[in-house]
Amino acid sequence: MSIDKETIKHVAHLARIELQPNELEKLFGELHEILGFIDKLSILNVEQVKPTSHILPISNVLREDAPHVSLGSDKALENAPSKKGNFFSVPKIIE
Amino acid sequence: MELNQLTAHELLEKLRAQQTTPEAILDSLYARIQKIDPKVKAYVRGQADRTPTEDRHACFLLGLPITIKDNICTEGLPTECCSKILQGFRPPYDATVINKLKKSGGVIFPLKANMDEFAFGSSTENSYFGPTRNPWNLDYVPGGSSGGSAAAVASDEAIWALGSDTGGSIRQPASFCGVVGLKPTYGRISRFGLIAFASSLDQIGPITKDVQDAAILTGLISGYDPGDSTSVNQDVPDYTKSLTGDIKNLKIGIPKEYFIAGMDTEVKMIIQEAVNKLKNLGALTSPVSLPHTEYAVPVYYIIATAEASSNLARFDGVQYGYRASSDNLIQMYKLTRAQGFGQEAKRRIILGTFVLSHGYYDAYYLRALKVRTLIKQDFDKVFGDFDCIVAPTSPTSAFKIGERAQDPLSMYLSDIYTISVNLAGIPAISIPCGFTKKGLPVGLQIMAKPFNEALLFRVAHTFEQNTDWHKLKPSL
């Protein structure tokens, strides 16, 4: 399996990355080579193998439903590139 | 010897005996950094305010400074993952490991160590701040991604350091710089406050001048943390008690797949000599097989990029760091990420998004998770009969700056011997075991069952105490 330029453009859009035409050209070559290398996996028969998404035998870790002190809004907003009052500020979403 | 040249345990003895002070140790570090860091570039962002050593004198570490990789959150101190997209970020909280070190009386060194952007790389060339250089030869890379931490320790610009390891990012630079580096068991150390790359693989670990320091530092930062649901609630032993110097009748497996064609012949000879040394010290070695080794790199570049593409979605110019200007929200995201991420980060995010996307998920991501199972089973099988596995850390010694920068695949292959360990979640240590004719260090990797760090320290320490490699210093 491989990848074409249209797919790279589409995936870059999904990943919210604006690509320059020269970047697209370069990525096309690199991804083509990397995916060719990755295709090595297709020779293995893995039909009966269970996937490992995580190495530890744990799932659904819960914590006590007890209140605790969280970061205040002042601190949470300290690093914001743009803020208004107690909020993060972004370009207008609704036309 | 100057104070900055000593190990942490030597300095702790001096501090306890009141033969020196934390201030004097910091002075010697700053003097060394001022003199040689313009050449080595282990640290980023230049001079910072000196951290006051305040009330830490009463605790175990007695005010001893520790160098931290730029992807571990330090309250109030810049933490940018050496990326433009986190420009100016000062975390409002400390990572759990930082908290633990402060509580133990440690001082967080205010300069942070260089790294490949978001830990994406094996040479520290992908840093937004430019590459770190190998202290043994400034034309060579220090390895990566924790290249700043390893170079700082090797050049005595740090007493000891923390790095992070997702596919070899502690062990490979430790090997290239001739120092000790441990990738602990997945879940041994809290990842809370480690800026995530691949959450099922990342672990924080020590980079030190000798094994005893690695054992001390690992003990201080290990343990369960409610802030990280994947940290494991298991007792932390006193790792320094495992340094017995006895490896008689220990069963060591030597995986044949780690001595393949394409491996540097000089490295191969050095590793074979090291294995003979372990045999002379009483260990029983025999060849073993980890048959799925050749699939580890492709599996890794699917799983790690998939997880990274998801983890790095948070860098969108809204809550922290760099923001590009645009009137349109989507365009603001796209420009911020286009301008804020370096080439390797973009490549990995796009590859990771691709392998997770509709129509490709089963062929790539799901298949990789299944092969990950096979890789883990290889280790389980060998550890049924053997105490540990010994292999090279990397197929070559350090390569030249620029040599692999334009060829991502050849860069990825320098982690061919370290990646399986992360996929299987087991612990592994790299220790110095020799030098090439060019004077570049070579690392020996020792791997063990989950939560068997104590055994790694015992084997590594025994080898170290019967060799002199860890005592050699680069001339800078």
Image (cartoon, coloured by chain):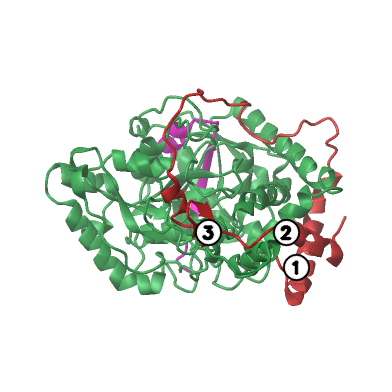
Measuring from the top left, give residue B46's x and y in whole percent: 36, 69
- Give how far apart the Cα atoms at labels 2 and 1 are: 9 Å
User: How many other residues sit within 10 Å of disc 3, few (<14), some (14-19) or many (≥20)?
Assistant: many
Q: Which residue is mark 1?
A: A27
Look at label 2 and name its amino acid.
Answer: Ile
Asked if B133 appears above or below A87 in the picture, the reply is below
Chain at numbered mark 1: A
Secondary structure beneath dot 2 equals: helix
Residue annotated with mark 3: B144
Give the extent of the magenta segment: B438-459
Residue B475 visible in the picture? yes
Query: The N terminus of chain B lies in which quarter of the figure?
Result: bottom left
Residue B206 at x, y percent in the picture = 42, 46
Instruction: Give coordinates of residue B219: x percent, y percent.
Output: 37, 35
Q: Which residue is mark 2?
A: B350
SS class, disc 1: helix
Discs 2, 1 touching: Cβ within 8 Å: yes
Residue A78: which quarter of the image?
Answer: bottom left
Drawn side of residue B447 relative to residue B282, left or right = right
Q: Which chain letter matches label 3?
A: B
| Above or below B440: residue B51 | above
Q: Residue at x 45, y 56 (%)?
A: B434
The residue lying at 54 percent from left, 72 percent from top is B401
